[in-house]
Amino acid sequence: MAKQGRAGRRRLGGGLVPQAAPRTPPRAGALAIGWFPRAEWGQAVERWPSLAEEMPVDFDEYRREVEARTKRIHRNLSGQALQLVALTISGLETYARDYERDPGTAETRGAYAAWQLQRGEGMLWPPHRNDLCWCRSGRKYKRCCGPVAAASDASRDEGQPAAPDGTSEQSSPVEQSSDPPE
């Protein structure tokens, strides 16, 4: 039987094997912060070019930008639980079709992230420094996205987007209440 070790790893036969962070049940009032994993990001930008208008096309720059903006949101919404939710193109398109929405909009991406959060698909943010990073790089958070500085609040005054997907925090594709559309 495998025992749970430090930093989200399982002990198997005396060695430590990296293990992905477990899914976390949604907390009441948690904000869902949706993001596209490496395997999905390039395809998402191709499918919805408007994503590239607000976020870097390069995945490593994109994940750093998501981290920086998430840190800013966390700082400004002190005490608010945040959970990161990995978005998939097929899941987003299915959700959009089922709820008669446009999958290319920030509003739909945010609603899909909130819907996934209700299903327990979120991961609490921030991870512990020795846990595997949320971006799925396989590295510890402290050596991956953890050192990224928070995005400046001044970016709002300069006309820069406030939320990870380039829209205001009120209609972000990455953060929404956890209520699905009716």
Image (cartoon, helix red, strand yellow):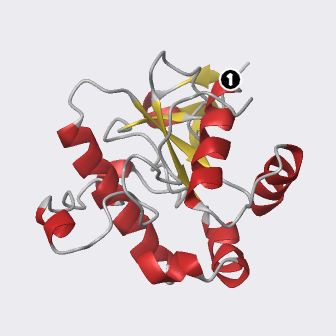
In the image, residue 128 above or below residue 61: above
Image point 51% across, 82% down: which residue?
52
Report x, y in % for residue 111: 62, 43
Q: Is residue 174 visible?
A: yes
Report x, y in % for residue 61: 40, 77
Image point 20% across, 64% down: which residue?
156
User: Which of these two is toward me, 38 or 3?
Assistant: 38
Image point 34% across, 35% down: which residue?
128
Image point 43% across, 76% down: which residue?
54
In the image, what residue type sits under mark 1? Ala
Q: Is residue 56 visible?
A: no
Where disc 1 sits, the SS reads: loop
Q: For mark 1, what is the residue?
A: 2
Q: Quadrant of the C terminus?
A: top right
In the image, residue 26 above or below residue 18: above
Q: Horizontally, is 42 left or right of 51 in the view? A: right
Task: Count numbered badges in the picture.
Answer: 1
The quarter of the picture where residue 60 lies is bottom left
